[in-house]
Image (spheres, rainbow, N blue to C red):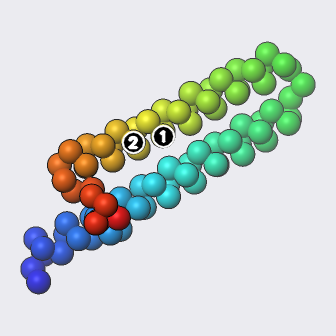
Amino acid sequence: MDFKTILPIIFEVVIIPLLAALTTVAVKWLNAKANEIKAKTDNTVLKKYIDMLNETISTTVIAVNQTYVDSLKEQDIFTEEAQ
């Protein structure tokens, strides 16, 4: 097997699942940090804006990940067989 044959296989088997795992970790970490910051303050307005920011960032991270996966599916790189 040459490098041009192995590279797409590595991409499908390693990179794509890794992106999903990293997205999950990033969202969980962000939620934990937001809760940590909220626990340190009594300001309800600040807590509200922390929640809004957390929700916005989490939604954006998930949407970007989904857009990336959809793009790969359109290119027939991300198929059920590759999963």
Residue at far right of view: 42
Residue at far front of view: 80
Say if residue 42 shows up in the picture. Answer: yes
20 sits left or right of 44 in the view? left
Q: How crowded is mark 2: few (under 14 residues within 10 Å), some or many (20 or more)?
A: some
Q: How many labels does the image show?
A: 2
- Quadrant in which the N terminus is drawn: bottom left
Give the residue at x 75% y 20%. Answer: 48
Residue for badge 1: 62
Question: Given the image, on which type of amino acid does mark 2 rest?
Answer: Gln
For residue 13, what is the image quadrant? bottom left
- Quadrant in which the C terminus is drawn: bottom left
Say if residue 15 shows up in the picture. Answer: no
Residue 58: x, y in percent?
56, 36
Give the residue at x 48% y 33%. Answer: 60
Q: Report how far apart the C-alphas of labels 1 and 2 lie in the structure.
A: 6 Å
The answer to whether 14 is drawn above or below residue 56 in the figure is: below
Residue for badge 2: 66
Residue 25: x, y in percent?
57, 54
52 sits left or right of 73 in the view? right
Question: Given the image, on which type of amino acid does mark 1 rest?
Answer: Ile
1 sits left or right of 20 in the view? left
